[in-house]
Amino acid sequence: NAGVTQTPKFQVLKTGQSMTLQCAQDMNHEYMSWYRQDPGMGLRLIHYSVGAGITDQGEVPNGYNVSRSTTEDFPLRLLSAAPSQTSVYFCASSLREGGETQYFGPGTRLLVL
Amino acid sequence: KQEVTQIPAALSVPEGENLVLNCSFTDSAIYNLQWFRQDPGKGLTSLLLIQSSQREQTSGRLNASLDKSSGRSTLYIAASQPGDSATYLCAVRRSGTYKYIFGTGTRLKVLA
């Protein structure tokens, strides 16, 4: 199993540009989520999904869109990048119920100029 | 609103010492609590998960306890090693939701 994979590893954007951060998992997990990690603020939940076709907002959803058309993939879209979105983004997945340990991807480091 | 606090923010100990990391949360209505380890520039690795009905979980030199009524969890690391140096984060999942709230972490350095 590859686990949770994220692409790209690093990206530089200019203010106003859009892009999609990719996340995929091969563990047949129903639950997938996106976090951003900023210095001194820990991880904050952006969006999450409990299955294909079902998504919901987390703590900091503004400026981000998600969709879940398959169990495996959960892309995060930045509609119009802003410097405040400079961060490290992590995708995670787990089983929806039971002892659902979360598995994290390696992260995408995003710099918005 | 659920808030998760981890104190201290940083800790430096000599090799071989037993140590305790703390995690506090404001709302006791949690579904579970999870401890993670994060190495610099890497993703998070799950260490222990405690369901709300459990009091503790153990894995090797690690033991995590949960006291919902007081809103506290501790991660006990026995006989610390330099390889234990990392940032340790706790996260709580609120009851009735799929939302996880993370603490800001404790940065641990174990000196050889």
Image (spheres, rainbow, N blue to C red):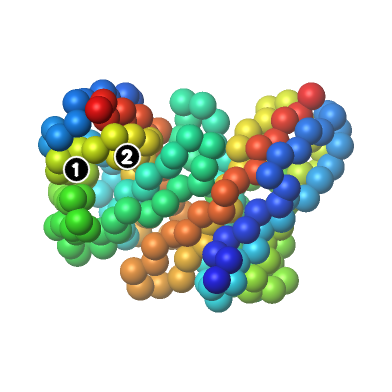
Image coords of residue A15 (percent x, y): 83, 29
A43, above or below B32, in the image: above
Image coords of residue A19 (percent x, y): 81, 45
B110, above or below B51, in the image: above
Image point (22%, 58%), residue name: B59
Of pointers 2 and 1, the one earlier in the residue sequence: 1
Residue topped by disc 2:
B83
Residue density around tag 2, few if under 14, some if 14–19, many if 20 or more, within 10 Å: few
Residue density around tag 1, few if under 14, some if 14–19, many if 20 or more, within 10 Å: some
Residue A33 lies in what quarter of the image? bottom right
Nearer to us in this view, B104 or B68: B104
- Report the amino acid beneath label 2: Gly
Residue topped by disc 1:
B77
In which quadrant will I find the C terminus of chain A? top right
For the question of whether residue A10 can be seen, the reply is: yes
Image point (33%, 35%), residue name: B85
Q: Which element type, helix, strand or loop, lies under badge 2?
A: helix
Image point (32%, 53%), residue name: B47
Image coords of residue B41 (percent x, y): 53, 37
Residue B14 lies in what quarter of the image? top left
